[in-house]
Amino acid sequence: MKYIKINNFYSVFSQPDYKGLDISKFEPGSQINPSNVTYSVCATNEELSSLPTDVEEITQEQYLQEKANIQNTNQQHQADLQQLQDTVAELIKETLK
């Protein structure tokens, strides 16, 4: 298994560009597409004798670090959203008094 980073992942129309990789060889559930960035990382079982343009091999440690960063960011976004919802609920309560 190889871990890869696909740079310039989104086309000008915001569609994924897999750079000719065989996505059926991707390890199910391994693909990570962080929001607000232009790359994707995943694990693949594809035999790659050479890497396409904009694709680089990364280590398992780099992949796991990317995954942890995304999970931390998602948790922070969820906490921020909950705080915003609580604030709006309080404002509504105050307005209705």
Image: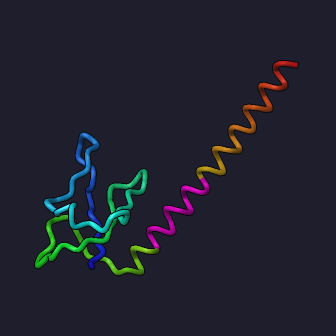
Q: Is residue 56 magenta?
A: no
Q: Is residue 70 magenta?
A: yes
What is the x, y in percent for residue 6?
A: 26, 63
What is the x, y in percent for residue 78?
A: 61, 50
Q: Nearer the viewer, residue 31 or 52?
A: 31
Number of residue marks: 0
What is the x, y in percent for residue 96?
A: 83, 18
Q: On the picture, is 78 further left or further right than 34?
A: right
Q: Nearer the viewer, residue 18 or 37?
A: 18
The correct choice, above or below, for 78 with respect to 57 in the image is above
What is the x, y in percent for residue 11?
A: 23, 47
- In the image, what residue occupies the spot 27% across and 61% down? 7
Hey, which quadrant is residue 54 in on the image?
A: bottom left
Q: Nearer the viewer, residue 29 or 75?
A: 29
Image quadrant containing the N terminus: bottom left
- In the image, what residue occupies the spot 18% across and 72% down? 46
- Residue at the extreme top of the image, as rendered: 96
- Residue at the extreme right of the image, as rendered: 97
Image quadrant containing the C terminus: top right
- In the image, what residue occupies the spot 46% across and 67% down? 67
The correct choice, above or below, for 55 with respect to 48 in the image is above
Residue stretch rendered in magenta on the structure:
65-76
- In the image, what residue occupies the spot 30% across and 75% down? 3
The correct choice, above or below, for 22 with respect to 43 in the image is above
Considering the whole magenta stretch, tell me its main secondary structure: helix
Tell me, what colour scheme is on the image? rainbow
